[in-house]
Every structure is written in C-alpha cells, then in structure tokens.
Amino acid sequence: MVVSQEVRHSALALAAAVLLRLLGGPAAASAQDFSLQPGARIRLTVPCERTASAGSEAAGQLRACSLTGELAAWRADTIELAMDGANTAYRLKTIRRLEVSRGYRSHWRFGAGVGNRLGRLEVFR
C-alpha cells in the first residue's frame, strides 16, 4: 500500500492535535475543581529583605523570597505556612505568588502508545 506524503502529514497533524487536546483538556478542567486543604504542599513568594547597595536605583526595595512548606491554616487575611516544625503567618496582602503542588503523574504509557502509532504510520508509508 502506497501512502502519499500529503496523507501522511495530515495523519501526523491529526494525531498531534488529538494528543494536545487529550493532555490539555483534563488539566484545565481539574484546576477549576481544586480546593486548598491544610497539609497541602505550597510555595509562597513574599517580600523578605531590603537590598543593601546604596548606589543602586533599587536600593531600599524589598527582595522576593520563595518559601516552601505545608499549609497549616488559611484565614480571611493570612496564610500560615509550616516549615521545619514551626508555623509562620503571612498576610495575604504581602503574598506575591502562591503555588500549589499537586504531585506528579506520569503519562509514559500514553506517550508510548502514541509513539507506537506514529511509528507504524512512518514505517508503512
């Protein structure tokens, strides 16, 4: 069976579009259903200390620091972060960024299946 190069490229483009849709769709939907619970691993970016160099135009400004720990409590105006056995409260006004670790999930089987299918298309041209 002879498959033209145009048909082969169309099949590859379709497979890539399906792959992107499958990988992108569930992540976006599950992000909307996520609620933050105490014990969740989080990273806060907060201002931490002033820069020391007097000659710099950024002198006296606060530097951003990233802190990683577990959420101890979430209140109306503060987040309490547990790090190294101690809890520290940070005002929500001062938090520049909040990142939540949702773990790691491998999709190697799915990737192997897609690679197998695309490889078969390439071999049988």
Image (cartoon, rainbow, N blue to C red):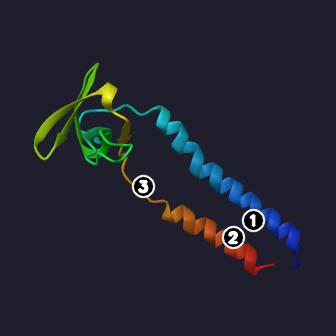
- Element type where label 3 sits in the image: loop
Relative depth, front residue between 100 and 23: 100
Q: Is residue 31 above or below residue 107?
A: above
For residue 64, side relative to residue 83 (left or right): right
Q: How many numbered callouts? A: 3
| Mark 1 Cα-neighbour bin, 10 Å: few <14, some 14–19, many ≥20 | some
Q: Are marks 3 and 1 in contact (CB under 8 Å)?
A: no
| Residue occupied by mark 3 | 105
CA distance for labels 3 and 1 = 26 Å
Q: Residue at x 31, y 30 (%)?
A: 94
Residue 45, visible in the rendered structure: no
In the rendered image, residue 89, in percent from the top left (x then y), is placed at 19, 30
- Element type where label 1 sits in the image: helix
In the rendered image, residue 51, in percent from the top left (x then y), is placed at 28, 45
Q: Is residue 14 above or below residue 54?
A: below
Residue type at mark 2: give it. Answer: Leu
Residue 62, visible in the rendered structure: yes
Q: Are marks 1 and 2 in contact (CB under 8 Å)?
A: yes
Residue type at mark 3: give it. Answer: Arg
Q: Which mark is residue 12?
A: 1
In the rendered image, residue 125, in percent from the top left (x then y), is placed at 81, 78
Q: Is residue 73 above or below residue 47?
A: above
CA distance for labels 3 and 2 = 23 Å
Relative depth, front residue between 124 and 30: 30
Earlier along the polypeptide chain: callout 3 or callout 1?
Answer: 1
Q: Residue at x 68, y 75 (%)?
A: 119
| Residue occupied by mark 2 | 118
